[in-house]
Amino acid sequence: MPMVPEAVFAMLACARLGAVHSVVSGGFAAGELAARIDHAKPRVVLSASCGIEPARVVEYKPLLDAALEQAEHRPASCVVLQRERCPATLVEGRNVDWDESVAKAAPAGWSATGSAPSPPSAGRWSSAACPRSARARSSAPPCATSPTGLPTARRPRSRTRRR
């Protein structure tokens, strides 16, 4: 993937899923890319149709196709971000268009029918993680609940003024 916002989205999506991701610089030789594919054994390869450099346009998709022909491991699919400067021909059954798959996707937690997710359960946001009575009796700093539902400690404010 070139340095585009979708590359960051892909990395964050891998982190959210707990999937390992390996970043490969654009324009790698097909043989080197094939060696990395064989070593990592990815289920999915994310790529772009091309990378745009100041003096030239580097076509990534032909390099990826050549690498997949040389590699022993076969990923289940390749998601390709089509760039306007150099759209690529997608291989039926292997390549998936990035924009089409994003358009079909539902937000996390939403069903395919479009119904909203249920609100968090009372137990998730209960005060059990940070009971007020225990906090009031101790001299520990107050704690809060993070969006993940886990307790987090707040830094106590300094009581002395800086001059």
Image (cartoon, helix red, strand yellow):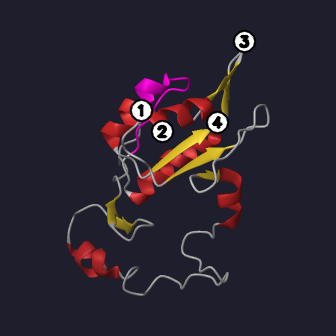
Secondary structure under badge 2? helix
Per the rendering, the mark at residue 4 is: 4
CA distance separating discs 3 and 4: 18 Å
Quarter containing the C terminus: top left
Q: Are marks 3 and 4 in contact (CB under 8 Å)?
A: no
Image coords of residue 94 (percent x, y)? 56, 52
Per the rendering, the mark at residue 59 is: none
Q: Are marks 1 and 2 in contact (CB under 8 Å)?
A: yes
Q: Residues within 10 Å of mark 3 (few under 14, many from 20)?
A: few
Residue 3 visible? The answer is: no
CA distance separating discs 3 and 1: 27 Å
Residue 134 against residue 78 in the figure, above or below: below
Tag 2: residue type?
A: Leu
First-in-chain label (4 vs 1): 4
- In the image, the segment drawn in magenta is 21-33
Q: How many marks?
A: 4
Label 2: which residue? 68
Left/right of residue 97 with respect to residue 10 in the rendered view: right
Image coords of residue 91 (percent x, y)? 63, 48
Q: Nearer the viewer, mark 3 or mark 2?
A: 2
Secondary structure under badge 4? loop
Tag 4: residue type?
A: Val
Label 3: which residue? 55
Q: Residue at x 29, y 75 (%)?
A: 129
Q: Residues within 10 Å of mark 1 (few under 14, many from 20)?
A: many
Label 1: which residue? 34
